[in-house]
Amino acid sequence: MYEEQANSKPVAAYYLTLIGGVLGIIVGFFLLFIIIGVWIIIANVLMIVYAQRLMAQSIEHSRYGTYIIILSILAGVNLLALIGGIIAVTYKPTNIQAATQPYQPFAHNTQPVQYQPSSYCPQCGSPVTGAVHFCSHCGKELTP
């Protein structure tokens, strides 16, 4: 749905849900002879699937976190997965590249580029005059 991906991942939510799901499956096997054991196994397998999707599409953290919370409650209050789901819902993705780029102030001493009155935009062919960096017709960046 979203084309952009967050660079950071909700690792804590993933591991808590993953561990909770595996432990829930183990408990489900012990309760396999009771009908509720089958449901516990199914719910915990779904939690693990949603934890995988959470890591693959961390921009959708709210949706997958909500699924994990609902399944952890329906599976008999799987506490680790419940905490993982809450962390996933409240997760705030950050763009690591933007946060780690050094600050580069704008250079104020640059001279504007002067174009000849007879120059034309290479993209649309509109006449370009004066000290402009972009074509006023199509918006193409003009290079001297």
Image (cartoon, helix red, strand yellow):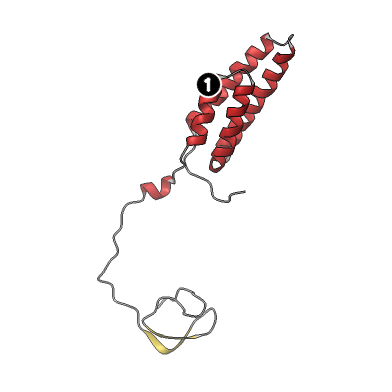
Taking the image as shown, residue 23 lies to the left or right of residue 132, namely: right
Residue 84 in sight: yes
x, y percent for residue 5: 53, 46
The answer to which quarter of the image holds residue 63 is top right
Image point 70% across, 22% down: which residue?
42
x, y percent for residue 30: 67, 9
Image: 122 above or below 117: above
Question: Which amino acid lies under the numbered mark 1 shown in the image of this protein?
Answer: Leu
Image point 50% across, 44% down: which residue?
6
Taking the image as shown, residue 56 lies to the left or right of residue 109, namely: right
Residue 14 in sight: no
Q: Dot 1 corresponds to which residue?
A: 80
Image: 125 above or below 8: below
x, y percent for residue 139: 49, 75
Image point 36% across, 47% down: which residue?
100
Disc 1 element: helix
